[in-house]
Image (spheres, rainbow, N blue to C red):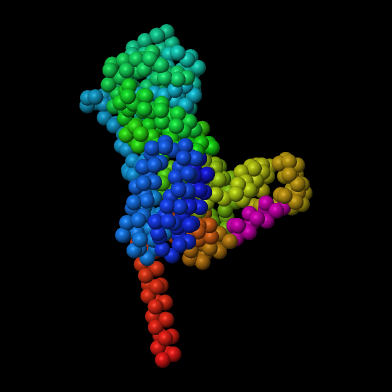
Amino acid sequence: MFDSLTDKLQSAFRKLTGNSQLTQKNISEAMEEVREALLTADVNYEVAQSFIQQVSQECLGEAVLKSVTPGQQAIKVVYDKLVELMGSQEAPLALQGNAPGEPAIFMLCGLNGNGKTTTTAKLASLLQKKYKKRALLAACDLTRPAAIDQLEVLGQSLSLPVHTNRQSHDVIQVAQEAIQAAREKNCQVVLLDTAGRLQIDEPLVQELVRLKEAVHPQEILLVADGALGQEAVSVARHFDQALDLTGIILTKLDGDARGGAALSMRQTTGKPIKFVATGEQTVDLETFHPDRMASRILGMGDILTLVERAHAEFEENEARKLEEKVRNATFDFDDFLKQMSRIQKMGGLMNLLKFLPGMGSLPPELMDEKAFRSTQGIIHSMTPQERQAPETINASRRARIARGSGSTPQQVTEQIRVFMNMREVMARMSQGGGASMLGSLFQGNGLADMASMLQKSASGPGLGRAAGYAQNGISHQDALSRAREKARKEAKRKQEKAARKKNRKH
């Protein structure tokens, strides 16, 4: 969703890094581009103006102007201000109930069509995986029978209890029944999926206020559509005035939304963004990290989130077995299928690449998901024996596989050739003393190695150099300090060389 904003910001930063020194004129020109980029992304006007003013003041400060790399230091200022704008740090969840042993109550509210019911299930999944808390889902939207049906289906897919009462028209009664059911089922959290409207009206607000006063929820979370831009900010203000929100969940960040809501909501409401939804599946809900989001917006990638996703999908023992197969060149098409399937569960290859420095603007044709599916079709058309020993596939077998997968024998031959070459290269890498890229990839550390490799070829100067330290856990501050130190040494070396040359002439 930030692709357009990222491109425009990087265009502005190229002007800064291309100058040997910063002046009020070139800072002003660059900040005008940044301002235009923010407004185009639907960032609130007052927020954009305040942001540009603060960044300009700091960029004209003595610490930046006298820096050896003033252009990069100016980018660091923008990064810091973006983090500050979005909340500085991860917002914690209140997971303790109103009394010892009581379940925590989360009340989710929002307008119809913003993904509230789906988000309730996503939050339940996240609570179970990240916080080890079992949630009960409560169907408190009594105006839409379809919402109750949807919540039941989602709860069943997660193997979590769902409380419904289709005969009741009293939302407070349903909520209190759900809380009692949570006690009986040993659930630590109750998620109340409340009613919405197409727009905010007084009956909706009053119903939510009465529910809040009756059950005293620990969290009141607004589910807001990130694609609505300024309208989403206005909705957040109205809900906050009525309910005193504890946080915001932004949905549809995987679409073509312009991103302004994410940059405006924290500043305009004073309430933190706690989670962001990045897809349709129940696993597609992430804790909102302002620093990581700022890195994504500036094209620096987000290695930490990528590693967390990998750890969630792959167990260490399995990764060791995979590495052993790679080392012995026994990695087969079945193993390849499993890894492809897991990459798709993590959001698909193109989505994963966007977490790597400099990869956000890769042309889609480089990693075509259709090509992935075509490869899967060819492998699925093989027998188990052929998958385990692809070198046994002769011409007649290739013809049969081609017919089964809707491809040509030549395509099958090419897939097998590429696979055999890949297996040989991975085995050589492993036997040569280096870590197996594929084996270590799914233990987390390999992601950093891959990011480093790709970053060298894909990232430009300045942004890429600072981002390149991310895989080693080095902060942007330290990265820029190292860059400055390197520049100082280079400048000193050139001065000494010039002095020696001058002495020789005399």
Q: Is residue 324 visible in this depiction of the protein?
A: no
Residue range (magenta): 413-424
Residue projecting furthest to the front: 25
What percent of the width, then of the height, locates residue 276? 43, 36
Residue in view at x 31 percent, y 30 percent: 246
Q: Position of residue 213 (x, y in %)?
A: 28, 17
Kindly identify the residue that appears in the image at 50 percent across and 38 percent down: 258
Q: Quadrant of residue 174?
A: top left
Foreground pick, 305 / 64: 64
Image x and y of residue 426, in percent: 56, 59
Q: 480 and 286: which one is in front?
A: 480
Image coordinates of residue 370 in percent, x first then y, are: 64, 43
Q: Find the residue positioned furthest to the bottom.
A: 506
In the image, what residue occupies the spot 42% across and 56% down?
Answer: 25
Badge count: 0
Judge by depth and name the residue closer to the eye, 55 or 78: 55
Whether residue 22 sits left or right of residue 176 in the image: it is right
Tell whether 256 sits left or right of 492: right
Q: Is residue 209 found inside the magenta-colored segment of the image?
A: no
Task: State the predominant SS element of the stretch in magenta.
Answer: helix
Q: Quadrant of the C terminus?
A: bottom left
Residue plotted at (58% across, 61% down): 425
- Determine whether 44 is above or below 80 in the image: above
